[in-house]
Image (tube, helix red, strand yellow):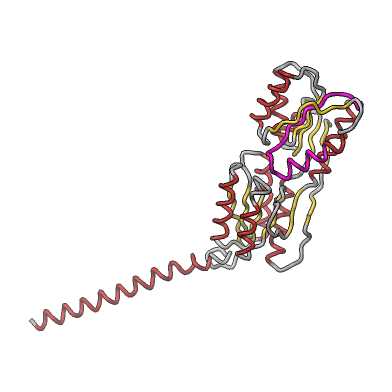
């Protein structure tokens, strides 16, 4: 009996030791995850950058993401990309997730420049620097804004149309998503070039939300009610390509100018189907955004606005 009690006691002690080892191991496994919350990758000290992008259904933003990924790899940083799919509520939620992950810097390409202000302010409270990309935010503290000069680009497109039409004709404007700085600024530059010009008239300005399918349907409707159209300016290439489909289906010969210089648009320009597109160089915007984020992490001073060059692409 005594022998049995001694064996039972020994077994209990062994189980207690094993349980203690198991508890210690579980805590050790959680430690790297907790340290990752400081913006490093599993406690390795790597910089983590969040990129909240408006939509990856648009080739322009795919190129921007790829440019950011390239720069992050070169810098030895981790890049977390979240796609809002043009849903403002989803983007705000995604930014909140990035804040919870305690990334070092958040790059935001807003779906809505006004609505995103709440997310920027939340990042400010968490002491996480914010950099806006391509589209600006209308609230909160932003360290730097990296984009092309969209007003200049819109004006460039308008002046090109003005020249090609010889100062006379009817123009249709396809607008981007309401509330985005890109739509507002491109439209502003375009109207600076074409408004109050004798013989020139913008007969329709309608939103197609930067979307090819919507560009097609909106242009179809405009063509049904307006037979006399000489040119179309679309705030991006996706809408321009949609409009081009509608124009070709209607058997019309209308000058079309887009914005972004996506591969499909440049091909259409070189084939003589589109007249021109304004090249924004999205990959360069993405690269510059990550490079600027790395400077911010190192405590270096950065400019509040960092422009990326534009150029007008016409048939070679």
Quadrant of the image for the C terminus?
A: top right
Most extreme residue toward the bottom is 2
Q: Is residue 196 left or right of residue 262?
A: right
Percent from the top left, x then y, of residue 248?
Answer: 72, 20
Percent from the top left, x then y, of residue 275?
Answer: 81, 29
State whether residue 225 is above or below residue 213.
above
Is 106 a magenta residue? no
Towards the viewer: 3 or 112:
112
Towards the viewer: 305 or 205:
205
Is 177 a magenta residue? yes
- Count of numbered badges drawn on the protein: 0
- For the point 72% across and 25% down, the residue is 244
State whether residue 66 is above or below residue 239.
below
Magenta span of residues: 167-190
Towards the viewer: 110 or 266:
110
Quadrant of the image for the N terminus?
A: bottom left
- For the point 61% across and 39% down, the residue is 57
Percent from the top left, x then y, of residue 20?
Answer: 32, 75
The image quadrant of residue 201 is: top right
Most extreme residue toward the left is 1
Percent from the top left, x then y, of residue 76?
Answer: 64, 61
- For the point 34% across and 70% down, the residue is 22
- For the point 69% across and 39% down, the residue is 178
The image quadrant of residue 25 is: bottom left
């Amino acid at each position: 009996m005594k022998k049995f009690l001694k064996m039972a006691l020994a077994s209990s002690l062994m189980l207690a030791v094993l349980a203690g080892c198991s508890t210690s191991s579980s805590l050790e496994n959680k430690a790297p995850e907790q340290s990752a919350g400081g913006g490093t990758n599993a406690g390795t000290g790597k910089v983590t950058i969040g990129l909240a992008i408006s939509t990856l259904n648009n080739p322009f933003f795919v190129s921007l993401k790829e440019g950011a990924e390239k720069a992050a790899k070169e810098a030895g940083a981790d890049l977390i990309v979240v796609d809002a799919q043009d849903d403002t509520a989803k983007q705000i939620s995604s930014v909140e997730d990035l804040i919870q992950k305690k990334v070092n810097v958040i790059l935001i390409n807003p779906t809505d420049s006004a609505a995103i202000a709440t997310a920027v302010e939340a990042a400010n409270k968490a002491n996480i620097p914010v950099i806006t990309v391509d589209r600006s935010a209308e609230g909160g503290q932003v360290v730097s804004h990296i984009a092309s000069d969209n007003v200049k680009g819109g004006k460039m497109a308008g002046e090109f149309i003005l020249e090609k039409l010889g100062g006379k004709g009817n123009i249709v404007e396809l607008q981007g998503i309401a509330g985005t700085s890109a739509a507002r600024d491109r439209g502003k530059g375009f109207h600076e070039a074409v408004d109050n010009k004798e013989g020139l008239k913008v007969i329709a300005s309608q939103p197609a939300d930067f979307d090819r399918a919507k560009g097609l349907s909106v242009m179809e409707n405009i063509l049904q009610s307006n037979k006399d159209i000489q040119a179309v300016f679309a705030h991006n290439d996706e809408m321009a390509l949609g409009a081009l489909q509608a124009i070709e289906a209607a058997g019309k010969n209308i000058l079309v100018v887009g914005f972004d210089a996506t591969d499909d648009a440049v091909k259409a320009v070189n084939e003589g189907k589109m007249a021109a597109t304004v090249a924004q160089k999205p990959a360069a915007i993405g690269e510059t955004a990550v490079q600027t984020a790395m400077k911010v992490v190192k405590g270096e001073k950065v400019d509040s606005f960092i422009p990326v060059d534009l150029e007008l692409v016409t048939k070679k």
